[in-house]
Image: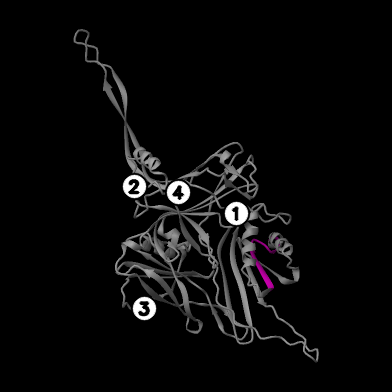
Amino acid sequence: MIHRILLLSAFVVCFATATIAQNYTQSNLIVDYEGLSATASLSVEAQNMLQVLLENVPEEEEIALIEIQVHCESEAIGETRLTPFVQFFEKQGINSEQLELITKVDDKKIVHIKINSSPKKVLPINKEKEIVALPVEASTVKKVYCAGASKKAEVFSVAPSLDIEIEGKEGTKVNIKREDLVYPDGEAVIASIKVELKEFYSSTDILLADLHTMEGNKVLETGGMLNLKITANGEPLELKSGKSAMIKMPTKRAKTKKGMNLYFGKRMADGAVDWSVQERPKPSSSVANNEASANSGAADFNPNSYIQLKTSSVLDSITVLKVPVNPKNVITGNHRKYTNKNVYHTHEEEYFDLELPYLNPNLVDGVWVNVDKRIDIDFSPKPIDVLVQVNGVPNMGMTANGDPISYTPRVALMLKSRAVFLRGTMVARNSSIQKQNVQFEEVPRNEEVVLVAFLDTGKEILFASQSIKATKNMEKPVLDLKPMSKVEFGDAMTTIAN
């Protein structure tokens, strides 16, 4: 069986000439091939990821060819491992004539899926009953984001009859009573529960995952993001009405801790995650007074928020002391007796106490949770737009008439003083001179920001970064992409994120 499959990147690039328009969708899938045989089928998660690629082929287009390229130790093994993918596409109504299977002999264990599509032609018959092809309008450029795809999920298996009590590698704790979970049809959950958790606390993880902190056009500051997927027998689970999932999120990397609210992520048309605030209904005055009194010792208590900032005592070490229990006997000369006493050394540590009021799972994405705070009211004067130019973008292929097609690097803007990450919009590209322009809106003025651009072509990693001050009449920043090794790229991302 396939144990793990992770969608690293998926994007749709459309290009057109006056007479022809072509599209292709390309994705890289990392597959654990252990135990995979010709009779094995793809996991539900893998099938849903591939389904997303098919759904992103425009309605006015039809699939012309799907290229499946598998990397493995031998050609024979490669043919075996291609079988489940062929079976999946055939179930989608795509026959073998539309599939091109390629085996690469190496140990990369990567599957490349490339979907070529072409415009659907309307073929009216004229008076002479001759077939005439209608002209095709140029397609618009479209990019599909796969936010969080760079982060590998931690997978937990919860045995039947047990509640969910898990802790992620970075300190996230999730507690849910089994009796509070049901299948979509309301049936109780008796089988094993699978929990997949992704934690996004560091700037590096957020940048690599192509995540941002925006609520529409409002700027947010994050205290941490999570992606949570809970299933049983391959089906998503929901919380019963009135029940909650309890989550504790560490605050060690949060630059701002007070005043945070719960935000749920919503998938937009272009595939990016947009955030919307979730607040509990305002309680009556008597209830509010009782809650405020009961929580008077809690830090930054807000009765309308599903998130509270709390503290806990963390044990650092234990010192064992010998303590005398009686003095020396002056008559017998016997030495005094001792007993051991433990001295506990602790420190107080803050954490976000989060109550998740409901689950709205998606088989592909799971539930996106963000601990955020609106910060637009903190900035004066008015935010500005920043146009960034990215140079050195390589070409990835050619159109039918010989025009170059360029890659699309990831470009991000982050604030130095706050955990704010803005996403840009491609406004212009020029493949012939390998440059692209990206627009960032609502950038806080007079703030120190870091611009980052990076691209993994499969052959090399290209990277560029620049620190600037966002001012009204600033010159257009230019990022020049340069090749570097994976180690150098990792070091560079860690440096700019700190």
Residue 281: give its label. 4
Distance from Cα at disc 3 to Cα at disc 4: 45 Å
Q: Which residue is mark 1?
A: 4
Q: Nearer the viewer, mark 3 or mark 1?
A: 3
Upstream in sequence: badge 2 or badge 3? 2
Residue at point 22% right, 8% down?
A: 332
Please state the horizontal and vertical placement of residue 106, each as a whole percent of the image.
61, 63
Please state the horizontal and vertical placement of residue 403, each as a whole percent of the image.
57, 84
Q: Which residue is mark 2?
A: 300
The amino acid marked with disc number 1 is Arg
Q: Is residue 456 visible?
A: yes
Secondary structure state at the residue bearing disc 4: loop
Q: Which residue is mark 3?
A: 476
Upstream in sequence: badge 3 or badge 4? 4
Q: Report which quarter residue 107 is drawn in.
A: bottom right
Q: Nearer the viewer, mark 3 or mark 4?
A: 4
**Left or right of 54 on screen, residue 490:** left
- Residue range corresponding to the magenta coloring: 63-77
Of the pair 221 and 341, the residue shown nearer to us: 221
Upstream in sequence: badge 4 or badge 2? 4
Q: Is residue 200 visible?
A: no
- The quadrant in which the C terminus is found is bottom left
Instruction: Examine the structure image and report whether residue 35 is included in the region drawn in magenta.
Output: no
